[in-house]
Amino acid sequence: MLTVLKNSWALFLGILLLMMGNGLQGSLLGVRGSLEGFSTGVMSVVMAAYFLGFLGGSHLAPEMIRRVGHVRVFAALASLISAVLILFPVLDDPVSWTIGRILIGFCFSGVYVTAESWLNNAADNATRGQALSLYMVVQMAGVVAGQGLLALGDPAGYVLFIIPSVLVSVSFAPILLSVSPTPAFESAKPLSLKALYAISPLGVVGMAILGGLFAAQFGMAAVYASAAGMSVAQVSAFVSAMSVGALVLQLPIGWLSDRMDRRRLVLMIAVFGGLAGMVAFFTHGHFALILAAAFVIGGMTSPLYALLLAYTNDFLDADDMAAASGGLVFVNGLGAIAGPLLVGWLMVGLGARGFFAFIVALMFSLAAYALWRMTRRPVLPVEETSPYAPISPSASPVAVEAAQEAAQEMAGEEGRSDAGQQGETA
Protein backbone atom coordinates (compact mmCIF):
# COMPACT_ATOMS: atom_id res chain seq x y z
CA MET A 1 0.00 0.00 0.00
CA LEU A 2 2.81 2.42 0.87
CA THR A 3 4.47 1.66 -2.46
CA VAL A 4 1.26 2.49 -4.31
CA LEU A 5 0.92 5.77 -2.38
CA LYS A 6 4.58 6.68 -2.99
CA ASN A 7 4.30 6.10 -6.74
CA SER A 8 0.93 7.81 -7.22
CA TRP A 9 0.64 10.35 -4.38
CA ALA A 10 0.09 13.26 -6.77
CA LEU A 11 -2.78 11.44 -8.47
CA PHE A 12 -4.40 10.58 -5.13
CA LEU A 13 -3.99 14.18 -3.94
CA GLY A 14 -5.73 15.44 -7.06
CA ILE A 15 -8.56 12.91 -6.63
CA LEU A 16 -8.95 13.93 -2.98
CA LEU A 17 -9.39 17.58 -3.98
CA LEU A 18 -11.85 16.61 -6.72
CA MET A 19 -13.97 14.58 -4.31
CA MET A 20 -13.93 17.38 -1.74
CA GLY A 21 -15.29 19.73 -4.39
CA ASN A 22 -17.89 17.24 -5.61
CA GLY A 23 -19.03 16.29 -2.13
CA LEU A 24 -19.41 19.91 -1.09
CA GLN A 25 -21.30 21.06 -4.17
CA GLY A 26 -23.93 18.32 -3.90
CA SER A 27 -24.79 19.09 -0.26
CA LEU A 28 -24.50 22.83 -0.81
CA LEU A 29 -27.06 22.79 -3.60
CA GLY A 30 -29.45 20.81 -1.43
CA VAL A 31 -29.26 23.44 1.32
CA ARG A 32 -29.23 26.44 -1.03
CA GLY A 33 -32.23 25.09 -2.95
CA SER A 34 -34.25 25.08 0.27
CA LEU A 35 -33.19 28.67 0.97
CA GLU A 36 -34.20 29.69 -2.56
CA GLY A 37 -37.66 28.18 -2.01
CA PHE A 38 -37.30 25.38 -4.57
CA SER A 39 -39.80 22.59 -3.91
CA THR A 40 -38.72 19.05 -3.12
CA GLY A 41 -40.01 17.90 -6.50
CA VAL A 42 -37.93 20.52 -8.29
CA MET A 43 -34.82 19.61 -6.29
CA SER A 44 -35.28 15.93 -7.13
CA VAL A 45 -35.09 16.82 -10.82
CA VAL A 46 -32.00 18.97 -10.23
CA MET A 47 -30.28 16.18 -8.32
CA ALA A 48 -31.24 13.47 -10.83
CA ALA A 49 -29.74 15.61 -13.61
CA TYR A 50 -26.24 14.92 -12.23
CA PHE A 51 -26.64 11.19 -12.75
CA LEU A 52 -28.04 11.68 -16.25
CA GLY A 53 -24.92 13.65 -17.14
CA PHE A 54 -22.70 11.11 -15.37
CA LEU A 55 -24.16 8.23 -17.36
CA GLY A 56 -23.70 10.14 -20.61
CA GLY A 57 -20.15 11.08 -19.71
CA SER A 58 -19.18 7.51 -18.91
CA HIS A 59 -20.06 6.55 -22.48
CA LEU A 60 -18.75 9.59 -24.36
CA ALA A 61 -15.57 10.30 -22.39
CA PRO A 62 -13.65 7.27 -23.74
CA GLU A 63 -14.18 8.48 -27.31
CA MET A 64 -13.12 12.01 -26.35
CA ILE A 65 -9.92 10.62 -24.83
CA ARG A 66 -9.15 8.60 -27.95
CA ARG A 67 -9.54 11.71 -30.12
CA VAL A 68 -7.65 14.38 -28.18
CA GLY A 69 -5.87 12.58 -25.34
CA HIS A 70 -6.10 12.36 -21.56
CA VAL A 71 -4.49 15.69 -20.72
CA ARG A 72 -6.76 17.82 -22.91
CA VAL A 73 -9.92 16.02 -21.81
CA PHE A 74 -9.02 16.31 -18.14
CA ALA A 75 -8.10 19.99 -18.35
CA ALA A 76 -11.15 20.94 -20.44
CA LEU A 77 -13.70 19.10 -18.30
CA ALA A 78 -12.22 20.18 -14.97
CA SER A 79 -12.20 23.82 -16.19
CA LEU A 80 -15.87 23.53 -17.13
CA ILE A 81 -16.69 22.10 -13.69
CA SER A 82 -14.97 25.05 -12.04
CA ALA A 83 -16.92 27.54 -14.17
CA VAL A 84 -20.32 25.92 -13.60
CA LEU A 85 -19.80 25.82 -9.83
CA ILE A 86 -19.31 29.58 -9.74
CA LEU A 87 -22.40 30.16 -11.91
CA PHE A 88 -24.81 28.25 -9.63
CA PRO A 89 -25.44 31.16 -7.19
CA VAL A 90 -25.72 33.62 -10.09
CA LEU A 91 -28.20 31.65 -12.21
CA ASP A 92 -30.42 30.69 -9.29
CA ASP A 93 -33.38 29.19 -11.14
CA PRO A 94 -34.31 25.50 -11.46
CA VAL A 95 -33.77 25.23 -15.22
CA SER A 96 -30.26 26.67 -15.03
CA TRP A 97 -29.43 24.44 -12.07
CA THR A 98 -30.68 21.36 -13.91
CA ILE A 99 -28.56 22.16 -16.96
CA GLY A 100 -25.62 22.92 -14.69
CA ARG A 101 -26.00 19.60 -12.88
CA ILE A 102 -26.09 17.72 -16.19
CA LEU A 103 -22.84 19.43 -17.17
CA ILE A 104 -21.28 18.78 -13.76
CA GLY A 105 -22.22 15.10 -13.90
CA PHE A 106 -20.92 14.74 -17.45
CA CYS A 107 -17.65 16.46 -16.63
CA PHE A 108 -17.02 14.61 -13.38
CA SER A 109 -17.63 11.32 -15.14
CA GLY A 110 -15.09 12.24 -17.81
CA VAL A 111 -12.60 13.43 -15.19
CA TYR A 112 -13.00 10.16 -13.28
CA VAL A 113 -12.48 8.13 -16.45
CA THR A 114 -9.28 10.06 -17.15
CA ALA A 115 -7.89 9.91 -13.61
CA GLU A 116 -8.79 6.25 -13.19
CA SER A 117 -7.10 5.42 -16.49
CA TRP A 118 -3.91 6.96 -15.11
CA LEU A 119 -4.33 5.07 -11.85
CA ASN A 120 -4.88 1.77 -13.63
CA ASN A 121 -1.85 2.42 -15.83
CA ALA A 122 0.33 3.24 -12.81
CA ALA A 123 -0.58 -0.04 -11.08
CA ASP A 124 0.55 -3.52 -12.10
CA ASN A 125 -1.12 -6.86 -11.49
CA ALA A 126 0.49 -7.14 -8.06
CA THR A 127 -0.66 -3.71 -6.83
CA ARG A 128 -3.93 -3.09 -8.70
CA GLY A 129 -6.12 -4.33 -5.84
CA GLN A 130 -4.23 -2.17 -3.33
CA ALA A 131 -4.49 0.84 -5.64
CA LEU A 132 -8.26 0.40 -5.94
CA SER A 133 -8.64 0.06 -2.16
CA LEU A 134 -6.64 3.23 -1.57
CA TYR A 135 -8.57 5.01 -4.32
CA MET A 136 -11.85 4.17 -2.58
CA VAL A 137 -10.51 5.40 0.78
CA VAL A 138 -9.40 8.68 -0.82
CA GLN A 139 -12.79 9.11 -2.49
CA MET A 140 -14.69 8.63 0.76
CA ALA A 141 -12.27 10.83 2.69
CA GLY A 142 -12.75 13.58 0.12
CA VAL A 143 -16.54 13.42 0.39
CA VAL A 144 -16.40 13.56 4.20
CA ALA A 145 -13.93 16.46 4.13
CA GLY A 146 -16.20 18.26 1.69
CA GLN A 147 -19.08 18.02 4.15
CA GLY A 148 -16.87 19.59 6.81
CA LEU A 149 -16.34 22.59 4.55
CA LEU A 150 -20.10 23.15 4.41
CA ALA A 151 -20.04 24.66 7.90
CA LEU A 152 -17.33 27.21 7.01
CA GLY A 153 -19.60 29.71 5.30
CA ASP A 154 -23.15 30.88 4.70
CA PRO A 155 -25.03 28.72 2.13
CA ALA A 156 -26.99 31.82 1.16
CA GLY A 157 -23.82 33.58 0.01
CA TYR A 158 -21.17 32.99 -2.67
CA VAL A 159 -18.10 31.86 -0.73
CA LEU A 160 -19.16 28.23 -0.41
CA PHE A 161 -19.61 28.02 -4.19
CA ILE A 162 -16.15 29.46 -4.75
CA ILE A 163 -14.49 26.87 -2.50
CA PRO A 164 -15.37 23.77 -4.61
CA SER A 165 -14.50 25.71 -7.75
CA VAL A 166 -11.04 26.45 -6.34
CA LEU A 167 -10.61 22.85 -5.13
CA VAL A 168 -11.36 21.47 -8.59
CA SER A 169 -9.05 24.00 -10.23
CA VAL A 170 -6.20 23.26 -7.81
CA SER A 171 -6.65 19.51 -8.41
CA PHE A 172 -5.27 20.02 -11.95
CA ALA A 173 -1.78 20.81 -10.71
CA PRO A 174 -0.68 17.60 -8.98
CA ILE A 175 -2.30 15.40 -11.60
CA LEU A 176 -1.20 17.18 -14.78
CA LEU A 177 2.30 18.06 -13.57
CA SER A 178 3.19 14.69 -12.06
CA VAL A 179 1.35 11.94 -13.92
CA SER A 180 3.24 10.42 -16.83
CA PRO A 181 3.29 8.79 -19.24
CA THR A 182 -0.13 9.25 -20.75
CA PRO A 183 -1.70 5.78 -20.82
CA ALA A 184 -3.13 4.12 -23.87
CA PHE A 185 -6.90 3.96 -23.50
CA GLU A 186 -8.74 0.74 -24.17
CA SER A 187 -12.10 -0.49 -23.00
CA ALA A 188 -13.82 -3.82 -23.38
CA LYS A 189 -16.89 -4.24 -25.56
CA PRO A 190 -19.76 -4.71 -23.11
CA LEU A 191 -21.97 -7.76 -22.95
CA SER A 192 -25.60 -7.21 -23.92
CA LEU A 193 -28.01 -6.69 -21.04
CA LYS A 194 -29.96 -9.76 -22.12
CA ALA A 195 -26.85 -11.93 -21.95
CA LEU A 196 -25.79 -10.36 -18.67
CA TYR A 197 -29.21 -10.96 -17.10
CA ALA A 198 -29.15 -14.58 -18.23
CA ILE A 199 -25.76 -14.98 -16.52
CA SER A 200 -26.65 -13.23 -13.25
CA PRO A 201 -30.22 -11.98 -12.71
CA LEU A 202 -29.40 -10.88 -9.15
CA GLY A 203 -26.36 -8.96 -10.37
CA VAL A 204 -28.38 -6.97 -12.91
CA VAL A 205 -31.49 -6.35 -10.78
CA GLY A 206 -29.35 -5.64 -7.73
CA MET A 207 -27.28 -3.09 -9.63
CA ALA A 208 -30.41 -1.26 -10.81
CA ILE A 209 -31.79 -1.11 -7.25
CA LEU A 210 -28.41 -0.09 -5.87
CA GLY A 211 -28.17 2.75 -8.39
CA GLY A 212 -31.40 4.18 -7.01
CA LEU A 213 -30.25 3.74 -3.42
CA PHE A 214 -26.85 5.35 -3.92
CA ALA A 215 -28.18 8.25 -5.98
CA ALA A 216 -30.85 8.94 -3.37
CA GLN A 217 -28.21 9.11 -0.65
CA PHE A 218 -25.60 11.04 -2.62
CA GLY A 219 -28.08 13.37 -4.32
CA MET A 220 -31.00 13.82 -1.93
CA ALA A 221 -29.52 13.47 1.57
CA ALA A 222 -28.94 17.21 1.93
CA VAL A 223 -32.39 17.96 0.47
CA TYR A 224 -33.94 15.65 3.06
CA ALA A 225 -31.88 17.17 5.88
CA SER A 226 -32.91 20.70 4.89
CA ALA A 227 -36.57 19.68 4.60
CA ALA A 228 -36.32 18.08 8.06
CA GLY A 229 -35.18 21.40 9.51
CA MET A 230 -31.59 20.43 10.29
CA SER A 231 -28.95 23.11 10.80
CA VAL A 232 -26.04 23.39 8.36
CA ALA A 233 -23.78 21.59 10.85
CA GLN A 234 -26.32 18.77 11.18
CA VAL A 235 -26.66 18.49 7.40
CA SER A 236 -22.89 18.11 7.19
CA ALA A 237 -22.84 15.45 9.92
CA PHE A 238 -25.76 13.53 8.40
CA VAL A 239 -24.25 13.31 4.92
CA SER A 240 -20.81 12.52 6.36
CA ALA A 241 -22.22 9.66 8.46
CA MET A 242 -23.23 7.80 5.30
CA SER A 243 -19.76 8.10 3.79
CA VAL A 244 -18.04 7.12 7.04
CA GLY A 245 -20.28 4.06 7.30
CA ALA A 246 -19.41 3.11 3.72
CA LEU A 247 -15.71 3.34 4.50
CA VAL A 248 -15.77 1.54 7.86
CA LEU A 249 -17.98 -1.38 6.86
CA GLN A 250 -16.46 -2.05 3.42
CA LEU A 251 -13.70 -4.37 4.68
CA PRO A 252 -15.81 -6.45 7.11
CA ILE A 253 -18.41 -7.04 4.40
CA GLY A 254 -15.66 -7.86 1.90
CA TRP A 255 -14.23 -10.39 4.38
CA LEU A 256 -17.64 -12.05 4.76
CA SER A 257 -18.14 -12.00 0.99
CA ASP A 258 -15.23 -14.37 0.46
CA ARG A 259 -16.47 -16.80 3.14
CA MET A 260 -20.21 -17.34 2.64
CA ASP A 261 -23.01 -17.54 0.09
CA ARG A 262 -23.05 -14.05 -1.43
CA ARG A 263 -26.80 -14.12 -2.03
CA ARG A 264 -27.30 -14.67 1.69
CA LEU A 265 -24.94 -11.77 2.41
CA VAL A 266 -26.87 -9.52 0.00
CA LEU A 267 -30.05 -10.54 1.81
CA MET A 268 -28.55 -9.77 5.22
CA ILE A 269 -27.16 -6.40 4.12
CA ALA A 270 -30.46 -5.36 2.54
CA VAL A 271 -32.43 -6.36 5.65
CA PHE A 272 -30.08 -4.44 7.96
CA GLY A 273 -30.25 -1.41 5.66
CA GLY A 274 -34.03 -1.60 5.55
CA LEU A 275 -34.30 -1.89 9.33
CA ALA A 276 -32.01 1.12 9.77
CA GLY A 277 -34.26 3.05 7.40
CA MET A 278 -37.31 2.08 9.45
CA VAL A 279 -35.63 3.31 12.64
CA ALA A 280 -34.97 6.68 11.00
CA PHE A 281 -38.49 6.83 9.56
CA PHE A 282 -40.23 6.22 12.89
CA THR A 283 -37.85 8.29 15.04
CA HIS A 284 -38.09 11.38 12.88
CA GLY A 285 -36.72 14.34 14.83
CA HIS A 286 -34.27 12.36 16.99
CA PHE A 287 -31.00 13.45 15.43
CA ALA A 288 -28.73 10.95 17.22
CA LEU A 289 -30.82 7.99 16.03
CA ILE A 290 -31.03 9.40 12.50
CA LEU A 291 -27.25 9.84 12.47
CA ALA A 292 -26.74 6.22 13.57
CA ALA A 293 -29.20 5.04 10.93
CA ALA A 294 -27.37 7.04 8.27
CA PHE A 295 -24.10 5.36 9.26
CA VAL A 296 -25.66 1.90 8.88
CA ILE A 297 -27.47 2.75 5.64
CA GLY A 298 -24.29 4.12 4.05
CA GLY A 299 -22.33 1.15 5.36
CA MET A 300 -24.80 -1.28 3.82
CA THR A 301 -25.27 0.48 0.48
CA SER A 302 -21.73 1.18 -0.72
CA PRO A 303 -20.24 -2.33 -0.21
CA LEU A 304 -23.17 -3.81 -2.13
CA TYR A 305 -21.64 -2.45 -5.33
CA ALA A 306 -18.45 -4.49 -5.01
CA LEU A 307 -20.41 -7.44 -3.63
CA LEU A 308 -22.73 -7.57 -6.65
CA LEU A 309 -19.74 -7.26 -8.98
CA ALA A 310 -18.04 -10.16 -7.22
CA TYR A 311 -21.23 -12.24 -7.31
CA THR A 312 -21.66 -11.63 -11.04
CA ASN A 313 -18.02 -12.58 -11.61
CA ASP A 314 -18.73 -15.94 -10.00
CA PHE A 315 -20.64 -16.95 -13.13
CA LEU A 316 -18.40 -15.34 -15.74
CA ASP A 317 -15.37 -16.63 -17.58
CA ALA A 318 -12.29 -14.58 -16.74
CA ASP A 319 -12.21 -13.12 -20.26
CA ASP A 320 -15.77 -11.79 -19.89
CA MET A 321 -15.35 -9.99 -16.56
CA ALA A 322 -14.24 -6.68 -18.02
CA ALA A 323 -16.94 -6.87 -20.71
CA ALA A 324 -19.62 -7.38 -18.05
CA SER A 325 -18.63 -4.18 -16.24
CA GLY A 326 -20.03 -1.93 -18.98
CA GLY A 327 -23.50 -3.45 -18.76
CA LEU A 328 -23.53 -3.36 -14.96
CA VAL A 329 -22.43 0.29 -14.90
CA PHE A 330 -25.17 1.17 -17.41
CA VAL A 331 -27.90 -0.55 -15.39
CA ASN A 332 -26.63 1.11 -12.24
CA GLY A 333 -26.72 4.47 -14.02
CA LEU A 334 -30.34 4.04 -15.06
CA GLY A 335 -31.28 3.29 -11.46
CA ALA A 336 -29.30 6.33 -10.33
CA ILE A 337 -31.29 8.64 -12.61
CA ALA A 338 -34.60 7.30 -11.29
CA GLY A 339 -33.56 7.35 -7.61
CA PRO A 340 -33.75 11.10 -6.83
CA LEU A 341 -36.96 11.48 -8.86
CA LEU A 342 -38.71 8.73 -6.89
CA VAL A 343 -37.42 10.08 -3.58
CA GLY A 344 -38.72 13.53 -4.49
CA TRP A 345 -42.11 12.08 -5.33
CA LEU A 346 -42.30 10.27 -1.98
CA MET A 347 -41.15 13.33 -0.06
CA VAL A 348 -43.89 15.40 -1.68
CA GLY A 349 -46.47 12.88 -0.45
CA LEU A 350 -44.99 11.86 2.91
CA GLY A 351 -42.89 14.86 3.84
CA ALA A 352 -39.18 14.63 4.62
CA ARG A 353 -39.60 11.07 5.94
CA GLY A 354 -40.29 9.95 2.38
CA PHE A 355 -36.50 9.86 1.97
CA PHE A 356 -36.26 6.93 4.38
CA ALA A 357 -39.45 5.33 3.04
CA PHE A 358 -37.71 5.05 -0.33
CA ILE A 359 -34.61 3.46 1.23
CA VAL A 360 -36.75 0.96 3.17
CA ALA A 361 -38.75 0.03 0.06
CA LEU A 362 -35.67 -0.57 -2.10
CA MET A 363 -33.68 -2.39 0.59
CA PHE A 364 -36.53 -4.81 1.31
CA SER A 365 -37.18 -5.25 -2.43
CA LEU A 366 -33.56 -6.26 -2.90
CA ALA A 367 -33.79 -8.60 0.09
CA ALA A 368 -36.92 -10.25 -1.32
CA TYR A 369 -35.35 -10.70 -4.76
CA ALA A 370 -32.15 -12.15 -3.27
CA LEU A 371 -34.23 -14.59 -1.22
CA TRP A 372 -36.15 -15.66 -4.32
CA ARG A 373 -32.93 -16.13 -6.31
CA MET A 374 -31.65 -18.42 -3.56
CA THR A 375 -34.46 -20.81 -4.51
CA ARG A 376 -33.63 -20.71 -8.23
CA ARG A 377 -29.93 -21.60 -8.29
CA PRO A 378 -27.85 -23.87 -6.05
CA VAL A 379 -25.25 -22.28 -3.83
CA LEU A 380 -21.79 -21.99 -5.35
CA PRO A 381 -18.99 -23.46 -3.19
CA VAL A 382 -16.93 -20.70 -1.58
CA GLU A 383 -13.71 -22.06 -3.07
CA GLU A 384 -15.14 -21.55 -6.57
CA THR A 385 -16.10 -17.90 -6.08
CA SER A 386 -14.11 -14.92 -7.35
CA PRO A 387 -12.36 -12.58 -4.89
CA TYR A 388 -14.04 -9.41 -3.61
CA ALA A 389 -12.40 -6.20 -4.88
CA PRO A 390 -13.53 -3.02 -3.05
CA ILE A 391 -14.87 -0.32 -5.34
CA SER A 392 -17.08 2.74 -4.81
CA PRO A 393 -20.48 3.11 -6.54
CA SER A 394 -19.29 6.51 -7.80
CA ALA A 395 -16.46 4.93 -9.82
CA SER A 396 -16.39 5.16 -13.59
CA PRO A 397 -16.39 2.13 -15.93
CA VAL A 398 -12.58 2.32 -16.03
CA ALA A 399 -12.26 1.65 -12.30
CA VAL A 400 -14.90 -1.08 -12.52
CA GLU A 401 -12.95 -2.79 -15.31
CA ALA A 402 -9.81 -2.44 -13.22
CA ALA A 403 -11.61 -4.07 -10.29
CA GLN A 404 -12.62 -6.92 -12.58
CA GLU A 405 -9.02 -7.31 -13.71
CA ALA A 406 -7.83 -7.28 -10.09
CA ALA A 407 -10.36 -9.98 -9.21
CA GLN A 408 -9.25 -12.00 -12.21
CA GLU A 409 -5.60 -11.70 -11.18
CA MET A 410 -6.37 -12.61 -7.56
CA ALA A 411 -8.31 -15.64 -8.75
CA GLY A 412 -5.35 -16.66 -10.90
CA GLU A 413 -2.96 -16.31 -7.96
CA GLU A 414 -5.22 -18.43 -5.76
CA GLY A 415 -5.39 -21.05 -8.48
CA ARG A 416 -1.60 -21.12 -8.82
CA SER A 417 -1.26 -21.31 -5.05
CA ASP A 418 -3.66 -24.24 -4.83
CA ALA A 419 -1.88 -26.01 -7.66
CA GLY A 420 1.45 -25.49 -5.90
CA GLN A 421 0.11 -26.92 -2.66
CA GLN A 422 -1.29 -29.93 -4.46
CA GLY A 423 2.09 -30.45 -6.13
CA GLU A 424 3.87 -30.34 -2.81
CA THR A 425 1.39 -32.82 -1.33
CA ALA A 426 1.90 -35.16 -4.28
Image: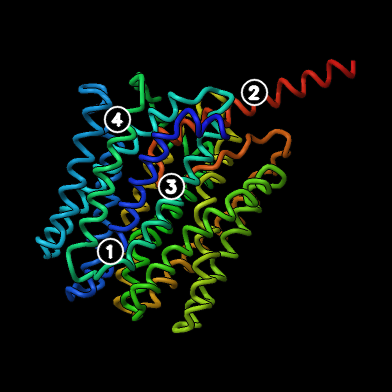
The reply to whether dot 2 and dot 3 touch (C-beta < 8 Å) is no
Q: Mark 2: which amino acid?
A: Gly
Q: Earlier in the sequence, mark 2 or mark 3?
A: 3
The reply to whether dot 3 and dot 1 touch (C-beta < 8 Å) is no
| Residue 236 placement: quadrant | bottom left
Q: Is residue 404 placed above or below 235 in the rendered structure?
A: above
Q: Quadrant of the C terminus?
A: top right
Q: Earlier in the sequence, mark 2 or mark 4?
A: 4
**Label disc, if present, on residue 101 of the rendered structure:** none
Where residue 275 appears, as percent x and y from the top left, is 57, 71
The reply to whether dot 1 and dot 2 touch (C-beta < 8 Å) is no
| Of the pair 389 and 366, the residue shown nearer to us | 389
Which one is in front in this view, the residue at disc 2 or the one at disc 4? Answer: 4
| Of the pair 367 and 288, the residue shown nearer to us | 288
Q: Which residue is the site of mark 3?
A: 139
Q: Mark 3: which amino acid?
A: Gln
Q: Which residue is the site of mark 4?
A: 176
Q: Earlier in the sequence, mark 3 or mark 4?
A: 3
Where residue 286 appears, as percent x and y from the top left, is 48, 83
Q: Mark 1: which amino acid?
A: Leu
Q: CA distance from mark 1 to mark 4?
A: 28 Å
Which one is in front in this view, the residue at disc 1 or the one at disc 2? Answer: 1
Q: Secondary structure at mark 4?
A: helix
Q: Which residue is the site of mark 1?
A: 28
Circle 2 Cα neighbour tier, 10 Å, few/some/many (<14 / 14–19 / ≥20): some
Q: Secondary structure at mark 2?
A: helix
Q: Earlier in the sequence, mark 3 or mark 1?
A: 1
Q: Which residue is the site of mark 2?
A: 412
Where residue 1 appears, as percent x and y from the top left, is 57, 34
The reply to whether dot 2 and dot 4 touch (C-beta < 8 Å) is no
Q: CA distance from mark 1 to mark 2?
A: 45 Å
Left or right? Give the position of 273 relative to 382: left
